[in-house]
Image (cartoon, helix red, strand yellow):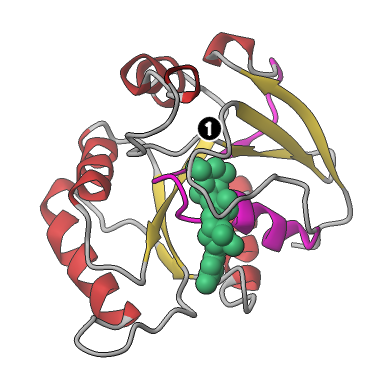
Amino acid sequence: AKIKEVEFVKSSNRPKDCPKDDRPEFAMLGRSNVGKSSLINALVRKKEVALTSKKPGKTQLINHFLVNRSWYIVDLPGYGFANAPEAARMDWSAFTKGYFLNRETLVSVLLLVDASVPPQKIDLDCANWLGRNNIPMTLVFTKCDKMKGGKAKRPDENIRNFQQLIRENYKRHPPWIMTSSMTGLGRDELLLHLSQLRNY
Ligand code: GTP
Ligand code: MG
């Protein structure tokens, strides 16, 4: 599962503009600021292959990265960011139909969920939608390095609660991985998981 090469291929603003070939791909889905672009950089061990920001709404297009000339990792704009300028806001209803339901080369969605906060309705809705539509999904919990003090819950507790809350929408519980782009936690495990999914 070694990464030798990663190449930015293109940015698309509509699903129909995405690269047309049959290489398998994985899409990063999740709330704005959850760490999608950061995780891509952590996976490929490059600082700014995918652009990141403290402010939500950084990624605004569908960005295809080709890994080892054999599979794609796709960075997507985040959802749930109400203050984005009109132009930067994705029409998620059109996008989901055009991409998640029709992209034949999509092996699995990586649904990123912030483990440092309790389960959020918008993430649960998203996970349930994927489950009900039988779209293959891997739950990737991010920011597991963050331990909030005081009464705030710990990552493992937030993760347990999230899984409990989506249970009934899945015939089989989706695979899940704890990660941190800061410490590298989960990187090797995730890469191995992706290679297993590709070789099915
Ligand atoms: P959009 O492009 O707006 O949808 O956001 P994104 O999901 O791509 O988030 P991005 O990777 O740009 O990261 C957002 C912020 O979270 C940045 O300030 C990152 O440094 C921070 N961040 C990302 N991953 C981690 C992590 O694992 N741990 C911690 N502590 N911070 C993280
Ligand atoms: Mg981003």
Looking at the picture, tell me which residue is in the foreground, 125 or 102. 125
Q: Is residue 36 visible?
A: no
x, y (%) of residue 84? Answer: 42, 31
Looking at the picture, tell me which residue is in the foreground, 108 or 85. 85
x, y (%) of residue 21? Answer: 71, 19
Quick check: 27 above or below 152? above
Question: Tag 1: residue type?
Answer: Leu
Image quarter for ligand 2: top right
x, y (%) of residue 171? Answer: 20, 49
Q: Residue farthest to the top?
A: 16
Q: Which residue is mark 1?
A: 106
- Corner quadrant of residue 32: top left
Q: Residue farthest to the right?
A: 4
Asked whether mark 1 lies closer than 8 Å to ligand 2, one says no
Specify whether 133 is left or right of 164: right
Looking at the picture, tell me which residue is in the foreground, 73 or 52. 52
Whether the magenta-drawn stretch holds residue 45 is answered as yes
- Corner quadrant of residue 161: bottom left
Looking at the picture, tell me which residue is in the foreground, 45 or 22. 45
Whether the magenta-drawn stretch holds residue 89 is answered as no
- Corner quadrant of residue 72: top right
Specify whether 3 is left or right of 96: right
Quick check: 133 above or below 52? above
Q: Is residue 100 visible?
A: yes
Instruction: Please report the bounds of the magenta region as a residue range.
Output: 20-46
Q: Residues within 10 Å of mark 1 (few under 14, many from 20)?
A: many
Quick check: 189 above or below 26? below
Quick check: 128 above or below 142? above
SS at mark 1? Answer: strand
